[in-house]
Amino acid sequence: MLAAVLRSVAARPPVEEVHRAVLGHPDVAGSPFLELGAPAGVPAAPLEAAGADPHGPVRAAARAGRFAEAAALAAACEQAALRAGGPRSPEAVHWLEVQADIAWLAGQPQRATAGWIRVAAARLAAGEAADSADVVRAVDQAHHCWLRVVDVSAARLLAAELEPLRRAVPGGRPGALRALHERLAELSAGPPGASAG
């Protein structure tokens, strides 16, 4: 949906314009997720002027519980960073991190796990060492979020991506790979679609 909005314009519009377009898009208009935590009739936090630091509007939306709005704004910033510097640029990776954090704050550990996996993969693809603090943090965050995914099928799918990362990036805590394998064994023992803590 956000990609459709961005493809419909010739040049990168100001963040406020993207915000209005996303909120007015047929797939989003009237979505209960956009109003999560915001009482009816309360306008969204005003966006900063075009060209200003976009963190303020993203932060304000997340703090107000408007997680879908915050995620859409962060995704727009990621797209702008991708166009400006490519997928390995520090700015693009930063906005992946912001989106993963927003998913966690929104109570979506599955999306947060996937986001942190993307961050770790992007950092490794950019040539960062597996033992660099940022790569270790990304894999640790992915693992932490994955432990809270309750949908067994989703947890298994995410584990298929997380396990090779954890193998390559053991992290600062001994036994992280073993703990991942133990939880994966527990998930495999239960029926598909069951909840796992």
Image: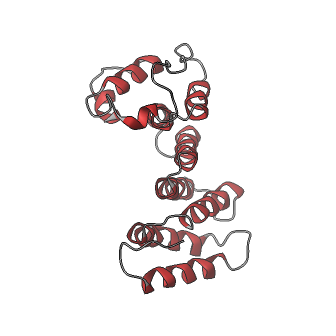
Q: In terms of image quadrants, where is residue 178?
A: bottom right
| Residue 130 visible in rendering | yes
Q: Measured along the vertical axis of the image, is residue 17 above or below residue 81?
A: above
Q: Which of the colour schemes (rainbow, by chain, secondary structure, one colour) is used?
A: secondary structure
Q: Measured along the vertical axis of the image, is residue 60 above or below residue 51?
A: below
Kindly identify the residue that appears in the image at 39 percent across and 20 percent down.
20
Residue 188 percent location from the top left of the image: 43, 83
- The outermost residue toward the top is 49
Kindly identify the residue that appears in the image at 50 percent across and 38 percent down.
67
Kindly identify the residue that appears in the image at 44 percent across and 86 percent down.
189
Name the residue nearer the viewer: 33 or 103.
33
In the visual, does 142 lie left or right of 23?
right
Quarter of the figure with the N terminus:
top left
| Residue 14 visible in rendering | no
Name the residue nearer the viewer: 22 or 127.
22
Residue 175 percent location from the top left of the image: 69, 80
Quarter of the figure with the C terminus:
bottom right
In the visual, does 19 lie left or right of 9?
right
Residue 87 percent location from the top left of the image: 47, 44
Q: Count all numbered tags in the image, as a single digit.
A: 0
